[in-house]
Amino acid sequence: MKDIKYGDDLLHVLEALSNPYRLKIIAVLKQDRQYVSQLARELGISRPLLYLHLKKLEEVDIIKGHHEVSEDGKAMKYYELTPFNLPLDEELIAGLENSLTMKKKNK
Amino acid sequence: MKDIKYGDDLLHVLEALSNPYRLKIIAVLKQDRQYVSQLARELGISRPLLYLHLKKLEEVDIIKGHHEVSEDGKAMKYYELTPFNLPLDEELIAGLENSLTMKKKNK
DNA sequence: TTCATATGTAATAATTTTATTACAGGTGTA
DNA sequence: TACACCTGTAATAAAATTATTACATATGAA
């Protein structure tokens, strides 16, 4: 996970973690890396939806994906977890208050 | 903040923290307790909206409100921060995986 | 009485997030 | 060729969150 220097970054990470599927993805990937289709089956969700969740986690560098070609020649996309540690308390939040934007999100 | 023993509790707290106004509220209340109308002015939002945010924070015991009568006889509602500490990492998440519900939220 | 302050909430609208459906394209094997 | 895998995304729908508007009620002071 990238260093959190700004309130907006902290918020971005918290948003990424605020979903049961995304927490589950972290738990699964902690055991071992996994490729997208298999991960979708394990979570019981569609690939398009999984991509959405993976994107949010990857945006904040909690997971990372890369392509690989399997032994039988198939193009696979594996995701793996990036260990992280976020000591969340009121001190951290207060310290980042000035770099926290209240405006709506763009894009 | 209440003890986090279940994945659903963790998620609930993360959701409560996933909003810039709510992070700001924590930062403001860390300095000192405050009453609702004044807090709304400081944040630049309406009271109805503030109530919504306060409710989400109070639900997970990050803040607590109580009524008080001011010197000049007005009924005031003050909120104060409850110090908390959440060491967020993949270990915590993996450990709570089994008590994490994927279903939609009720209510 | 009128004004300024305070709390509280119901109803609705706007926006964002989450989820689904429908595609297209690739490789290896039967 | 047809089938069973795989990746990737656009378009749309559904659901949840966030925000606004409009009220009602109460107190003290001018």
Image (cartoon, coloured by chain):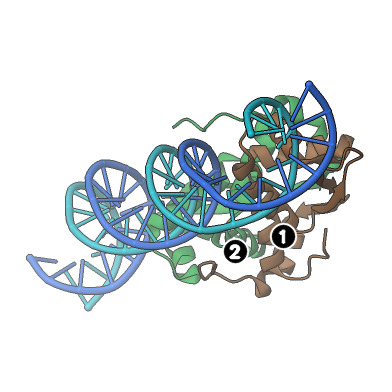
Chain colours: A green, B brown, C cyan, D blue
Chain letter for mark 2, please. A
Q: In the displayed structure, would residue B47 be above or below residue B104?
A: above
The residue labelled by disc 2 is A24
- In this image, D14 relative to B26: left or right? left
Cα separation between marks 2 and 1: 23 Å
Chain letter for mark 1, please. B
Position of the C terminus of chain B by quadrant = bottom right
Residue at left offset 51%, top offset 33%: A105
Residue at left offset 69%, top offset 35%: B40
Q: Amino acid at mark 1?
A: Glu
Residue that protrudes farthest toward the right in the picture: B71
Q: Residues within 10 Å of mark 1 (few under 14, many from 20)?
A: some
Residue A61, horizontal then vertical, whole percent:
62, 41
| Residue placed most toward the observer, B78 or D1 | B78
Q: In the displayed structure, would residue B87 be above or below residue A27?
A: above
Q: Quadrant of residue A58?
A: top right
Circle nearer the viewer, 2 or 1 = 1
Q: In the displayed structure, would residue B5 be above or below residue B87?
A: below
Residue B80, horizontal then vertical, whole percent:
85, 46
Instruction: Please indicate, yes or no, whether residue A81 appears anywhere in the rendered image.
Output: no
- In this image, A15 relative to A69: left or right? right
| Residue placed most toward the observer, B55 or A10 | B55
| Residue placed most toward the observer, B89 or B42 | B42
SS at badge 1: helix
Instruction: Please indicate, yes or no, whether residue B22 appears anywhere in the rendered image.
Output: yes
Residue D10, horizontal then vertical, whole percent:
26, 41
> Do tag 2 and tag 1 residues touch (Cβ < 8 Å)?
no
Residue B53, horizontal then vertical, whole percent:
65, 47
Q: Which mark, residue B59?
A: 1
Residue at left offset 72%, top offset 40%: B23
Q: Amino acid at mark 2?
A: Lys
SS at badge 2: helix
